[in-house]
Image (cartoon, coloured by chain):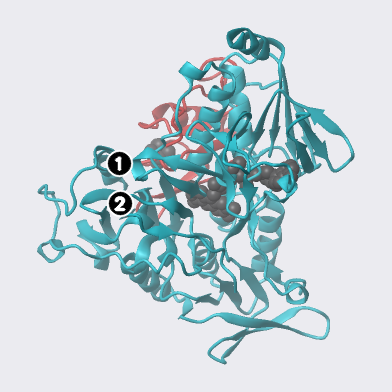
Chain colours: A cyan, B red
Amino acid sequence: MAADYMDWLRREGRIVIVGASLAGLRAAETLRAEGFAGELTLIGDEPYEPYDRPPLSKSVLLGMASPHRTELPHRLDIDAKWRLGVPATGLDLTAKRVKLADGDEVQYDRLLIATGVRARPWPKEDEARLTGVCVLRTRDDAADLYQRLKAGPRRVFVIGAGFAGSEIASACREMGIPVTVAERAGAPLVGALGGVIGAVAADLQTEHGVDLRTHVTVTSLEGDSVGRVRAVHLSDESVVEADVVVVSLGSQRNTEWLTGSGLGAGPRGIACDAGCRAFDFRGIVTDDVFVAGDVARSPHALFGYQFLSLEHWGNAVAQAETAAHNMICRGADRRPHLWMPAFWSSMFGVNIKSVGVPPMGDQLMITQGSPAERRFVGVYGYQGRVIAAVSFDNTRWLEFYARQIERGAPFPVEYPTVDRRPENRQPVAADFPDPSLPTHGPTVTLSGYSPADQQLVFHPARH
Amino acid sequence: MRLVVDLNKCQGYAQCAFLAPDVFALHGEESLVYNPNAPEEQRERLARAVAACPVQAILADGLDDLAGEPGSGSGREASDGR
Ligand SMILES: Cc1cc2nc3c(=O)[nH]c(=O)nc-3n(C[C@H](O)[C@H](O)[C@H](O)COP(=O)(O)OP(=O)(O)OC[C@H]3O[C@@H](n4cnc5c(N)ncnc54)[C@H](O)[C@@H]3O)c2cc1C
Ligand code: SF4
């Protein structure tokens, strides 16, 4: 019976994907590559075909690429019905129907949700509407920001020094634009990489002429008489004049459209099992609704089965492939999504990469190179195990550490390495902020119980 | 022609920047930046870069007649997403 159903589904079933970006496209390709011959529909609220986002804060701002030309290459022809420029507004789990904003309804036999995240806007709406107040998530955002930077503003003000904010600050400096960065924590990248590495990132910024302000929050944005932003007011009572303000306070998951659907979806994303099947609000796994990409939270065996939300490009690709595979195969052939988290960023000419889950680490050891030279590898330890690694301009080591994490290799690390410095033999505290305190958009969010029974609860950043 | 580089895989070996310097460039020691929409006249150079990348991190479409299997883009990007 079940086998018959699967044959039928693969032959003539209907699969709907909501969210036509990286995860949605890669899932569609995988479905076709694995033999799905039925009807495939992609629904996306952006009026564009799937495009790549990482270049928007890198080559686009550096003037090497057009914000409007980052469309993703296709691996194969997916022969899909595209419904672009129309958001999904509701889901009926019983009738298996997705409702669209234009009143249409689309019937599915299997559904994949890949609606990702959006930029968290500046919370005060009247201030957020001032001309010159920007966010960066979409290609339209990138086109707008690039225009403003090209116009030669007197000063750019970046609120939030996560990866995105730091990359934007880096681009500004490269264009010779004065830039101020405000961060509530003690250093940039603290939520993602901890205070020790954050201090290195802080030095990088100041060396490149960024006016970095830490331990401060922005209290208000001031506009002029024609509604252009003019100045930024800070919690330390200082005022910084700026004509472009980039709000880089992390992201919000696009799950509102699922409100009332009965799916386990909320501000923390959509929880799913290791096979990418969504949970309903009772915690019971559904069998025909799958999730992938930035909007998903899924348990990972290597990290104590914690639910990880990874706003990582590589995760969107890998999870989409696994979800698509699992959507059209029998139970015994399903695969778990056990991707080794990996992330990259580049700023101020330095290539920053990580593997594993750095925020789980409580200790850190520099195993190669030295932070003073801006070329090193830091390894994070958690309860005697290697749990993550970060590299600054030292990519070649990460593959090795990925294997160490997989093997649960002991921490502190003991193996002799080529360019280990005597000053780095002892682990130090990795210095992550208290996970129960809000930070600016961590790229990895831990939620649920850890094996140590230490409960980590995510509170969305509020400014 | 569209392209994307899986920068988790990329090792910054710079073969691509050597073979197609108008599409790929190293920024600093190891950071690769590239134009995701390479102009048509770069077709041949791009195909060479795709073929030369030691970790097969570059996926490009529209190169079928030059490299890769038909209908599969470059067909060379491995699929573990890393
Ligand atoms: C500027 C920038 C730089 C980045 N740099 C890096 C980097 O260096 N390294 C890295 O690993 N990652 C980076 N990322 C993250 C990476 O781009 C994301 O992880 C990836 O885009 C996730 O893909 P996704 O398909 O899950 O979600 P998204 O790309 O967010 O796509 C979701 C899509 O669904 C649409 N949607 C939402 N709601 C609805 C609805 N109700 N109906 C229909 N459609 C809907 C959205 O509009 C969007 O098009 C960066 C992101 C940005 C914005
Ligand atoms: S050839 Fe491949 S590994 Fe080397 S820089 Fe280019 S993309 Fe990266």
**Are the numbered discs 2 and 1 placed on the same chain, yes or no?**
yes
For label 2, the residue is A389
Dot label at residue A154: none
Q: Nearer the viewer, residue B56 or A359?
A: A359
- The reply to whether discs 2 and 1 touch (Cβ–Cβ < 8 Å) is yes
Q: Nearer the viewer, residue A361 or A258?
A: A258
In screen coordinates, is B18 left or right of A160? Answer: left
Dot label at residue A402: 1
Q: Where is residue A31 shown, x and y percent of the image?
A: 60, 21
Q: Is residue B67 above or below residue B32?
A: above
In screen coordinates, is A397 left or right of A97? Answer: left
Q: Nearer the viewer, residue A222 or B61?
A: A222
- Find residue A286 and report its image quarter: top right
**Can residue A143 be seen at all in this image of the molecule?**
yes
**Can residue B18 be seen at all in this image of the molecule?**
no
- The residue at 10%/63% (across/down) is A422
- Image quarter for ligand 2: top left
Q: Is residue A380 above or below residue A101?
A: below
- The residue at 58%/66% (across/down) is A249
Q: Where is residue B11 shown, x and y percent of the image?
A: 35, 41
Which residue type carries mark 1?
Ala
Position of the C terminus of chain A, as image quadrant, is bottom right
Q: Where is residue A236 shown, x and y percent of the image?
A: 53, 90
Which residue type carries mark 2?
Ala
